[in-house]
Image: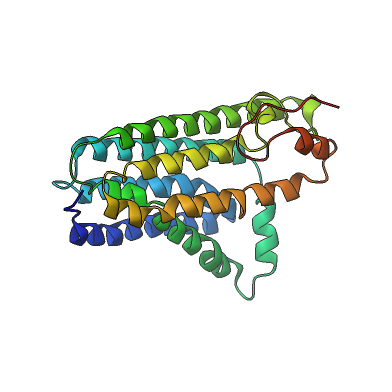
Amino acid sequence: MSGFPWAAFAQNLGFAAGAAFAVMLVTFAVAVRKGLHRIVDVAWGIGFTAVALVSFAASAGEGDDVRRVLVTALTAVWGLRLAAHIARRGRGHGEDPRYDAMLAKAPGNRDLYALRMVYLLQGALVWLVSLPVQAAQYVPGPVTGFAWAGVALWVCGLFFEAVGDAQLARFKRDPANKGKVMDRGLWSWTRHPNYFGDFCVWWGLFLFTCDSGAAAAVSVVSPLVMSYLLTKGSGKPMMERHMAQRPGFAEYVARTSGFFPLPPKPRR
């Protein structure tokens, strides 16, 4: 499909960058005041929501209204649910050990190092990963099967994320499970239902751009980057290194799929 409005989309890229970095800078100011940089994780989902809303406003009069509303709403629901979940999970806790370890190596001012290495980096990632959300606002013509397939994949992803997070939270609330490996529910089918859910969400949002070859070509970097981060970067590998010394984890790995959901192997 031709007629993709490149000039308007290019302008939107600037608006989206402003929204992403504004969220991160405000979060940085709050974190410095509280002395707690773990709250940047809450800003991740909020940043995507801000980009979606700004892009929706900037694209008025462009694209297809049904697609614009759908992609904005799905992004906001995903982002705000994730932010609320992380905020609840971190309530009452001190600094995240990951950030403590990183900032212990800071050359000079710890907060300025965190600004460069955490907040600005995450702002750039929000801008990059949100490319399908931005581009979909400008795709001309009515939605087709690509967009509805994207909705279905997004629903699958949100299910794995939300249900997996709820199951893990319930497991952790039971003192009898302290130090044990969560291997029930969705966690018996994949060692990372929340990361698999993220994977589905971003490939689903990418499908909204596939009615325009131009928009899809620009946006495919987003799910590719997210897939790499989840499977090879800061997602699965980091979590599994953290869990490796926990009793029973090696047996859990042997019987449970590493990423894509599969029936669990029988216990030996």
Colour mapping used in the image = rainbow
Residue at 63% from the left image edge and 38% from the top image edge: 192
Relative side of 187 to 208, left or right: right
Q: In the rendered view, would you say 241 is above or below 182?
A: below
In the rendered image, residue 56, in percent from the top left (x then y), is placed at 25, 45
Q: What is the tally of numbered marks visible in this picture?
A: 0
Q: Nearer the viewer, residue 56 or 115?
A: 56
Q: Residue furthest left?
A: 61
Inspect this view and state whether residue 169 appears: yes
Across and down, in percent, residue 236 comes to 65, 47
Residue depicted at 86% across the width and 27% down the height: 268
Q: Position of residue 148 (x, y in %)?
A: 33, 31
Q: Is residue 267 above or below residue 225?
A: above
* Residue 19 makes an appearance in the image: no
Q: Residue at x 63, y 40 (%)?
A: 259
Please give the name of the residue rendered at 67% of the width and 55% of the height, measured from the top-left corner: 98
| Percent coordinates x, y for residue 13 in the rendering | 30, 59
Residue 100 sits in which quadrant? bottom right
Whether residue 151 sits left or right of residue 94 in the image: it is left
Rendered image quadrant of residue 22? bottom left
Q: Residue furthest bottom?
A: 108
Q: Nearer the viewer, residue 25 or 255?
A: 255
Nearer to me, 142 or 88? 142
